[in-house]
Amino acid sequence: MRAKITYAVTAAILVVYFVLVGSRGILLIETGTPVTIAFGVAVLILPGIGLWFLWKNTQFVRKANQLAAELDAEGGLPVDELRRTPGGRIDRDSADEVFARRKAETEDAPEDWRTWFRLAVAYHDARDTPRARKAMQRAIALHEGKPVQPA
């Protein structure tokens, strides 16, 4: 729940920032000189890109949470079996062991979104965020029945 609150607060702050920046862009455009119009348009592009990125990221998180809820209802969420250091961090060797098992499961059932979801969690635990995100995107695509390119 804490992560959801943090995400919502961060998203709200970003939206406020985008509105403020966008209003400055409009003011620059209203000035009417060629230079301020060009700057105003450039300033408006940045919040547009930011809003698009925020929207895409929010959609990704929402879909991943839906998959987690469905997997939880099936009783298939991965169990936290990782060893931790005294400071609470995940032990790297433990994460690598779980990752190897999850990867083998995914290779045995490459069309099952559940195995890709669990692989994404294993990537995340191994601190490989880019691959975790790609694996989760693949899980989402398989769940939605969209065509998936070979890995």
Image (cartoon, rainbow, N blue to C red):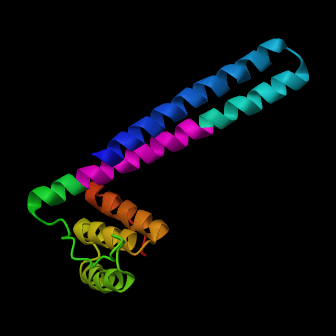
Residue 76's x, y, as percent? 14, 66
Kindly identify the residue that appears in the image at 43 percent across and 63 percent down: 133
Horizontal side, residue 78 vs residue 37: left or right:
left
Quarter residue 101 falls in: bottom left
The answer to if 66 sits in the magenta stretch is yes
Q: Give the extent of the magenta segment.
A: 49-67
Residue 38's x, y, as percent? 83, 28
Residue 40's x, y, as percent? 77, 25
Kindly identify the residue that appears in the image at 26 percent across and 58 percent down: 143
Look at the image and tell me whether residue 147 can be seen: no
For this orientation, the residue located farthest to the right is 34
For this orientation, the residue located farthest to the front is 86
Residue 89's x, y, as percent? 36, 71
Look at the image and tell me whether residue 84 can be seen: yes
Q: Against 22, is 32 above or below?
A: above
Q: Against 60, is 16 above or below?
A: above
| Quadrant housing the N terminus | top left
Kindly identify the residue that appears in the image at 28 percent across and 58 percent down: 145
The answer to if 87 sits in the magenta stretch is no
Kindly identify the residue that appears in the image at 10 percent across and 63 percent down: 75
| Quadrant housing the C terminus | bottom left
Q: Of residues 16 and 59, which is closer to you in this image? A: 16
Q: Of residues 10 and 63, which is closer to you in this image? A: 10
Quarter residue 78 falls in: bottom left
